[in-house]
Structures are given as C-alpha cells and as structure tokens.
C-alpha cells in the first residue's frame, strides 16, 4: 500500500479507538447519513456495520482508513 498524502510506502497497521460511554473499544463505519434517535444517539438498528482498518504513514503521519469487513 501507498500513502495518498506523501506517496510513502511505510504504512503501519493500527485501529481507531472509541472510548465513549457503552463503547466496545473500537469504532465501526455505518453506511448512510447520520440519523439521530429520540435521545440524540445515532440510529443504527438494522443497518450493517463495518470494521475500520487503519494505517498510519510513518513518514508524514497521515491516516488511511478502510472498511472492508462487515461485523
């Protein structure tokens, strides 16, 4: 893989942490626009969720995010 910012090849894998209330510890990507429920949280019921794979460029620090796997 290549960094889209600086074209470097030194991408290290990692993950995006979610440390919010009732969090599972990692973030997920959900398709479609954000819709809020009656209590202000994101409406997610029945919507697919995808694991976020993150890579950080060791040269410039840019993050590349991919969501290839449904969880």
Image: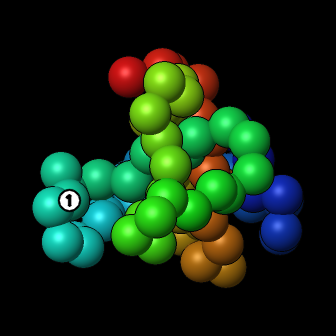
Q: Between residues 30 and 52, which one lies in front from this camera angle?
A: 30
Give the residue at mark 1: 23
Tell me where residue 42 appears, x and y as whole percent.
Answer: 49, 58
* 49, 51: nearer the viewer: 49
Residue name at image x 54 percent, y 70 percent:
58
Q: Residue furthest front?
A: 38
**Residue drawn where x is 68% and y is 37% of the image:** 31
Count of numbered badges drawn on the protein: 1
Left or right? Give the position of 71 relative to 19.
Answer: right
Residue sitting at x 50%, y 49%? 43
Looking at the image, can residue 10 be seen? no
Residue 67 drawn at (x, y percent): 59, 35
Q: Position of residue 30 (x, y in %)?
A: 58, 40
Residue 68 visible to an observer of this rendering: yes
- Local crowd at mark 1 within 10 Å, few (<14), some, or many (≥20)? few
The quarter in which the C terminus is drawn is top left
Which of the pair 60/31 is nearer the observer? 31
Quadrant for residue 4, please give it: bottom right
Q: Secondary structure at mark 1?
A: loop
Tell me if residue 20 comes above or below residue 36 in the rendering.
Answer: below
Find residue 21 and report its image quarter: bottom left
Residue 16, relative to residue 61: is it above or below? above
Quarter the N terminus occupies: top right
- The scheme the figure's colours follow is rainbow
Residue 54, given in percent of the width and then of the height, sits at 50, 51
Q: Quadrant of residue 39?
A: bottom left
| Residue under the point 46% across and 64% down | 38
């Amino acid at each position: 893989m290549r960094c889209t910012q600086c074209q470097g090849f030194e991408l290290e894998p990692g993950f995006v942490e979610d440390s919010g209330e009732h969090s599972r510890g990692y973030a997920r990507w959900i398709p479609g626009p954000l819709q809020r429920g009656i209590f202000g949280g994101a409406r997610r019921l029945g919507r697919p969720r995808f694991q976020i794979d993150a890579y950080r460029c060791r040269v410039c620090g840019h993050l590349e995010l991919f969501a290839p796997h449904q969880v």
